[in-house]
Amino acid sequence: MAGGESSEEAHTAIVEAIRKRALLQFNYKGHIRIVAPYCFGVSTRGEDVLRAVQVRGSSASNGMGFGKLWTVTDIAEPRVLDEGFTPDDPHYNPDDSAMTHIYCRVERSRRQASA
């Protein structure tokens, strides 16, 4: 699904999940993903993207446990889960260099910033 209502629905769910520090579930290219969302903004290509760590679900690459960029127009059926997460990815950078503009992000705690 691309553009229109599905993108607006994804935007709303992403922002809510980041603000609540809640896991986010969505269908991405035929796979159900459950991710910890960290940063939402505009990529250097001008596309809305989500930086998130996949924690469960399926993946064509089996890549889990590290931050990946997800193109928002490819996110379908987004749902904020009633399950929170602790933003403890040691590689997370709130000033994500893959984004030219950031809409919403998890702020690093002082403990993370000093680590």
Image: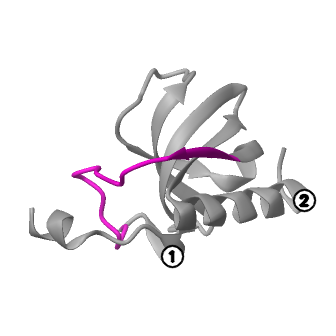
The residue lying toward the viewer, choosing from 81 and 14, is: 81
Tell whether 65 sits left or right of 49.
left
- Residue at 47% across / 22% down in the picture? 61
Give the structural element (helix, strand or loop) at label 2.
helix
Between marks 2 and 1, how big is the CA–CA gap?
A: 21 Å
Query: Residue beneath label 2, please?
Result: 5
Q: Is residue 19 visible?
A: yes
Sequence-earlier tag: 2 or 1 = 2
The residue lying toward the viewer, choosing from 106 and 83, is: 83
Q: Where is residue 57, by image quadrant?
A: top right
Locate residue 22, reporting x and y percent.
Answer: 54, 52
Looking at the rendered image, the quarter that the C terminus falls into is: bottom left
Locate residue 77, reporting x and y percent.
Answer: 79, 42
Asked if the magenta segment contains residue 87, the reply would be: yes
Q: Is the residue marked by circle 2 packed among few (<14), some (14-19), or many (20+) residues within 10 Å? A: few
Give the prevailing secondary structure in the magenta stretch.
loop
Q: What residue type is labelled 1?
A: Ile
Tell whether 30 sits left or right of 39.
right
Q: Is the residue marked by circle 1 packed among few (<14), some (14-19), or many (20+) residues within 10 Å? A: some
Residue extending furthest right?
Answer: 5
Colouring mode (rainbow / by chain / secondary structure / one colour): one colour
Q: What residue type is labelled 2?
A: Glu
Give the structural element (helix, strand or loop) at label 1.
strand
Query: Residue beneath label 1, please?
Result: 102
Tell whether 77 sits left or right of 92.
right
Asked if the magenta segment contains residue 84, the reply would be: yes
Locate residue 114, reporting x and y percent.
Answer: 10, 69
Tell whether 17 sits left or right of 27.
left
- Residue at 29% across / 49% down in the picture? 89
Q: Give the range drawn in magenta.
A: 80-96
Residue 76, compared with residue 30, is above or below; it is below
Locate residue 17, reporting x and y percent.
Answer: 59, 58
